[in-house]
C-alpha cells in the first residue's frame, strides 16, 4: 500500500454524483479526493442515489482508493461563529446536521469545516458559538468526523491559531468526532513559518496533538507570511515553495494522513475567451517525482489545448 495518500478537490454533480468524482480523481492519478456535496458558495443540495454510491464504492475498491481517506468539504458560507441573528445560527447548525447525514449516506467519514467568522461579536463569543453548534451537530456518539480547518485570518475569521482550535476542541463532548485539517497556505498566511516546519509541527503537537490531524490541504501561497489573505498558488510557484511543501507532504510524522490539493486552475487568454485548466494531474506527478518543474504551468496549458 502506498504511503502517500494524495488527491485534490474534484467536482460532484447531480447527474454523475460520487461516480463522477471518483472518475475525475482517477484521471488525475489520485488515491483520494475531496468534494462538496453541492456548490461551495450555497446550501442547495440534491438527493443521493444509493445505486450511484454503490457503483462509486466498487470503482474505488477496484482502484485502491480507501473511502476512509475521502473528504467532504462543507460550504464556506456556513458560519457557526455568528449568533447575532438566531435564525442564521440555527440554519448553520441544521445545514451541518444535514451534511453529516449526507456523508453517512455516501459512506464518507471526514468533513472539513471552516470554523467561521465572529462578524464583530468578538473572538471568544465566536469560539463559544462554534462549540455550542458543534455539540448539537455531533450529539450522536458515533458518526463522521468534523475536521476544523486552520484559517488564514482574513476579516474576523477565527481558527487562525492552534490555540483557537484547541479551545474549540476542548469544548466538544464527543472527542472521537472532532479533528483538524491543516491548510499549508492558511497557516503560512496566519504567520506560521513553514521554513521551520518541524517547529510548527512540534507546536501543533504540544497544543493540540498530532493524533488530531484528520487531513491536510496542500497549497502554495501567493502572499508573504502573516499576510492574512488566503490566496492559494500552484505547488512550488508561491511564497512557501516546492522544497518546503515536499518536506511537509513526505514528513515521517504525517504518513497515512490524506493530503488534498486545492491549487488554482491554470488560466489562459485566447482572444476574447478565458480558458482554465485543472493542474492536479501534473502537480501530483511532480510531487511523486519529487522534482520541481518550473515549466509546469505551460505544460498544463499545452496538454489541454
Image (cartoon, rainbow, N blue to C red):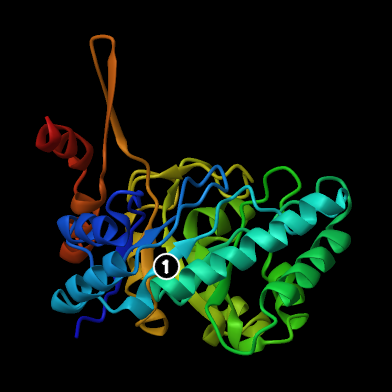
Q: Quadrant of residue 247?
A: bottom left
Task: Examine the rendering and report whether any part of residue 81 can be seen.
Answer: no
Residue depicted at x 18% and y 78%: 64
Q: In the depicted view, which residue is nearer to us: 268 or 41? A: 41
Residue depicted at x 35% and y 49%: 13
Lateral position of residue 89 relative to residue 64, left or right: right
Say how many tags the image has. Answer: 1
Q: Split into 4 quadrants, where in the image is the C terminus?
A: top left
Task: Examine the rendering and report whether any part of residue 61 can be seen.
Answer: yes
Few, some or many residues within 10 Å of mark 1 (<14, 14–19, 20+): many
Q: In the depicted view, which residue is nearer to us: 181 or 104? A: 104
Residue 143 higher or lower than 158, as above or below: below
Q: Quadrant of residue 97?
A: bottom right
Indicate the position of residue 75 as horizontal and vertical percent values: 55, 52
Indicate the position of residue 278 as horizontal and vertical percent values: 26, 43
Lateral position of residue 266 relative to residue 180, left or right: left
Residue depicted at x 57% and y 59%: 187
Q: Residue furthest top?
A: 272
The secondary structure type at the circle numbered 1 is strand
Residue 85 higher or lower than 261, as above or below: above
Q: In the depicted view, which residue is nearer to us: 299 or 67? A: 67
Indicate the position of residue 142 as horizontal and vertical percent values: 57, 88
Q: Split into 4 quadrants, where in the image is the N terminus?
A: bottom left
Indicate the position of residue 124 as horizontal and vertical percent values: 87, 63
Residue with the mark numbered 1 = 71
Residue depicted at x 54% and y 71%: 101
Lateral position of residue 218 relative to residue 126, left or right: left
Q: In the depicted view, which residue is nearer to us: 58 or 238? A: 58
Amino acid at each position: 500500500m502506498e504511503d502517500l495518500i494524495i488527491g485534490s478537490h474534484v467536482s460532484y454533480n447531480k447527474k454523475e454524483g460520487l461516480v463522477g468524482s471518483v472518475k475525475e480523481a482517477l484521471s488525475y492519478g489520485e488515491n483520494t479526493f475531496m468534494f462538496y456535496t453541492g456548490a461551495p458558495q450555497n446550501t442547495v443540495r440534491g438527493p443521493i442515489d444509493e445505486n450511484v454510491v454503490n457503483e462509486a464504492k466498487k470503482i474505488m475498491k477496484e482502484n485502491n482508493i480507501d473511502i476512509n481517506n475521502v473528504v467532504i468539504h462543507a460550504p464556506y458560507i456556513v458560519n457557526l461563529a455568528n449568533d447575532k441573528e438566531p435564525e442564521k445560527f440555527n440554519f448553520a447548525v441544521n445545514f451541518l446536521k444535514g451534511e453529516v447525514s449526507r456523508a453517512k449516506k455516501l459512506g464518507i467519514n471526514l468533513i472539513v469545516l471552516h470554523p467561521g467568522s465572529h462578524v464583530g461579536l468578538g473572538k471568544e463569543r465566536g469560539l463559544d458559538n462554534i462549540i455550542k453548534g458543534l455539540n448539537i451537530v455531533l450529539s450522536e456518539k458515533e458518526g463522521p468526523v468534523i475536521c476544523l480547518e486552520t484559517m488564514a485570518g482574513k476579516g474576523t475569521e477565527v481558527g487562525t491559531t492552534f490555540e483557537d482550535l484547541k479551545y474549540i476542541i476542548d469544548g466538544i463532548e464527543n472527542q472521537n468526532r472532532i479533528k483538524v485539517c491543516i491548510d499549508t497556505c492558511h497557516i503560512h498566511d496566519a504567520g506560521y513559518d513553514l521554513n521551520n516546519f518541524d517547529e510548527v509541527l512540534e507546536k501543533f503537537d504540544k497544543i493540540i496533538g498530532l493524533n488530531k490531524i484528520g487531513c491536510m490541504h496542500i497549497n502554495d501561497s501567493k502572499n508573504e507570511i502573516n499576510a492574512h489573505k488566503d490566496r492559494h498558488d500552484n505547488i512550488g510557484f508561491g511564497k512557501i515553495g516546492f522544497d518546503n511543501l515536499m518536506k511537509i507532504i513526505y514528513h515521517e510524522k504525517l504518513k497515512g494522513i490524506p493530503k488534498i490539493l486545492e491549487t488554482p486552475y491554470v488560466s489562459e487568454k485566447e482572444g476574447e475567451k478565458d480558458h482554465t485548466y485543472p493542474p492536479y494531474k501534473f502537480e501530483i506527478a511532480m510531487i511523486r517525482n519529487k522534482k520541481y518543474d518550473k515549466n509546469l504551468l505551460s505544460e498544463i496549458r499545452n496538454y489541454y489545448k
